[in-house]
Amino acid sequence: MYTLIIGFSVFLSVLLIIVVLAQNSKGGGLSSQFGGSGASNMFGVKKTGDFLEKTTWVLVALIMVLALATNFTTPGVSRGSNSILDAAGEQAAPQQQTAPADATTTPAAPADSAQ
Protein backbone atom coordinates (compact mmCIF):
# COMPACT_ATOMS: atom_id res chain seq x y z
CA MET A 1 0.00 0.00 0.00
CA TYR A 2 2.84 2.36 0.89
CA THR A 3 4.54 1.76 -2.49
CA LEU A 4 1.27 2.34 -4.32
CA ILE A 5 0.71 5.68 -2.56
CA ILE A 6 4.27 6.82 -3.26
CA GLY A 7 4.01 5.80 -6.92
CA PHE A 8 0.70 7.61 -7.31
CA SER A 9 2.17 10.70 -5.62
CA VAL A 10 5.10 10.75 -8.04
CA PHE A 11 2.70 10.38 -11.00
CA LEU A 12 0.53 13.26 -9.74
CA SER A 13 3.62 15.40 -9.15
CA VAL A 14 4.78 14.92 -12.74
CA LEU A 15 1.26 15.68 -13.96
CA LEU A 16 1.21 18.84 -11.82
CA ILE A 17 4.52 19.96 -13.33
CA ILE A 18 3.09 19.52 -16.84
CA VAL A 19 -0.11 21.40 -15.98
CA VAL A 20 1.79 24.29 -14.39
CA LEU A 21 4.18 24.55 -17.33
CA ALA A 22 1.23 24.56 -19.75
CA GLN A 23 -0.12 27.68 -18.09
CA ASN A 24 1.03 31.10 -19.17
CA SER A 25 0.96 34.01 -16.77
CA LYS A 26 -0.34 36.27 -19.53
CA GLY A 27 -3.30 34.04 -20.35
CA GLY A 28 -1.99 32.40 -23.54
CA GLY A 29 -0.84 29.14 -22.04
CA LEU A 30 -2.21 25.96 -23.53
CA SER A 31 -4.05 27.59 -26.41
CA SER A 32 -0.92 29.16 -27.87
CA GLN A 33 1.68 26.50 -27.05
CA PHE A 34 0.10 23.16 -27.87
CA GLY A 35 -1.78 23.26 -31.12
CA GLY A 36 -3.06 26.81 -31.18
CA SER A 37 -6.46 26.74 -32.85
CA GLY A 38 -7.45 23.20 -31.86
CA ALA A 39 -7.25 23.87 -28.14
CA SER A 40 -8.84 27.30 -28.37
CA ASN A 41 -11.77 25.95 -30.39
CA MET A 42 -12.36 23.23 -27.86
CA PHE A 43 -12.06 25.23 -24.63
CA GLY A 44 -11.61 28.84 -25.59
CA VAL A 45 -8.82 30.94 -24.12
CA LYS A 46 -10.66 31.84 -20.92
CA LYS A 47 -11.97 28.34 -20.32
CA THR A 48 -8.50 26.87 -20.87
CA GLY A 49 -7.16 29.02 -18.04
CA ASP A 50 -10.05 28.05 -15.75
CA PHE A 51 -9.62 24.36 -16.53
CA LEU A 52 -5.86 24.45 -15.90
CA GLU A 53 -6.29 26.41 -12.68
CA LYS A 54 -8.88 24.00 -11.31
CA THR A 55 -6.73 21.05 -12.36
CA THR A 56 -3.76 22.58 -10.54
CA TRP A 57 -5.73 23.00 -7.31
CA VAL A 58 -7.14 19.46 -7.50
CA LEU A 59 -3.69 17.97 -8.09
CA VAL A 60 -2.21 19.94 -5.19
CA ALA A 61 -5.01 18.79 -2.87
CA LEU A 62 -4.55 15.16 -3.93
CA ILE A 63 -0.79 15.31 -3.37
CA MET A 64 -1.34 16.78 0.11
CA VAL A 65 -3.84 14.05 1.02
CA LEU A 66 -1.47 11.35 -0.22
CA ALA A 67 1.41 12.89 1.72
CA LEU A 68 -0.67 12.73 4.89
CA ALA A 69 -1.78 9.18 4.06
CA THR A 70 1.83 8.00 3.91
CA ASN A 71 2.11 8.84 7.61
CA PHE A 72 -0.42 6.10 8.38
CA THR A 73 0.94 3.52 5.95
CA THR A 74 4.67 3.83 6.62
CA PRO A 75 5.98 0.30 7.19
CA GLY A 76 7.86 -0.56 10.38
CA VAL A 77 6.77 2.41 12.47
CA SER A 78 4.97 1.88 15.77
CA ARG A 79 2.08 4.24 16.38
CA GLY A 80 1.94 3.93 20.17
CA SER A 81 5.05 5.81 21.20
CA ASN A 82 7.36 8.50 19.99
CA SER A 83 10.57 6.54 20.32
CA ILE A 84 12.68 9.28 18.76
CA LEU A 85 11.29 11.89 21.17
CA ASP A 86 11.68 9.53 24.12
CA ALA A 87 15.32 8.86 23.21
CA ALA A 88 15.98 12.60 22.84
CA GLY A 89 14.46 13.25 26.26
CA GLU A 90 16.69 10.62 27.86
CA GLN A 91 19.78 12.17 26.30
CA ALA A 92 18.85 15.69 27.33
CA ALA A 93 18.24 14.88 31.01
CA PRO A 94 21.57 14.79 32.88
CA GLN A 95 21.98 11.82 35.12
CA GLN A 96 22.76 12.79 38.71
CA GLN A 97 25.09 10.56 40.63
CA THR A 98 24.25 10.25 44.29
CA ALA A 99 26.82 9.29 46.89
CA PRO A 100 25.93 6.45 49.24
CA ALA A 101 24.41 7.66 52.46
CA ASP A 102 26.70 6.52 55.29
CA ALA A 103 27.94 8.10 58.51
CA THR A 104 31.25 9.38 57.10
CA THR A 105 29.69 11.64 54.50
CA THR A 106 26.96 13.24 56.60
CA PRO A 107 27.93 16.56 58.15
CA ALA A 108 28.43 16.62 61.90
CA ALA A 109 26.04 18.53 64.09
CA PRO A 110 27.36 21.95 65.14
CA ALA A 111 28.98 21.98 68.55
CA ASP A 112 27.22 23.89 71.26
CA SER A 113 29.59 26.63 72.48
CA ALA A 114 27.37 27.86 75.31
CA GLN A 115 28.49 25.20 77.80
Image (spheres, rainbow, N blue to C red):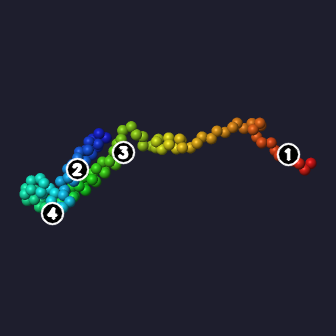
Query: Could you tell me residue 18's position as x and y percent?
Result: 20, 50
Q: Element type at marker 1?
A: loop
Name which residue type carries label 1.
Answer: Ala
Q: Residue at x 64, y 39 (%)?
A: 97
Q: Element type at marker 2?
A: helix
User: Which mark sits nearer the N-terminus, 1 or 4?
Assistant: 4
Q: Is 25 or 95 nearer to us in this picture?
A: 25
User: Which mark sits nearer the N-terminus, 4 or 2?
Assistant: 2
Residue 84 visible to the viewer: yes
Q: Which residue is mark 2?
A: 17
Which is in the foreground here, disc 2 or disc 3? 2
CB contact under 8 Å: marks 1 and 4: no
Query: Could you tell me residue 78's position as x and y percent?
Result: 42, 40
Name which residue type carries label 3.
Answer: Phe
Quadrant the N terminus occupies: top left
Q: Residue at x 70, y 36 (%)?
A: 100
Name which residue type carries label 4.
Answer: Lys
CB contact under 8 Å: marks 2 and 1: no
Q: Which residue is mark 4?
A: 46
CB contact under 8 Å: marks 4 and 3: no
CB contact under 8 Å: marks 1 and 3: no
Asked which quadrant contains residue 39, the reply is: bottom left
User: Which mark sits nearer the N-terminus, 2 or 3?
Assistant: 2
Q: Which residue is mark 3?
A: 72
| Number of the label disc, if any, that sits on residue 111 | 1
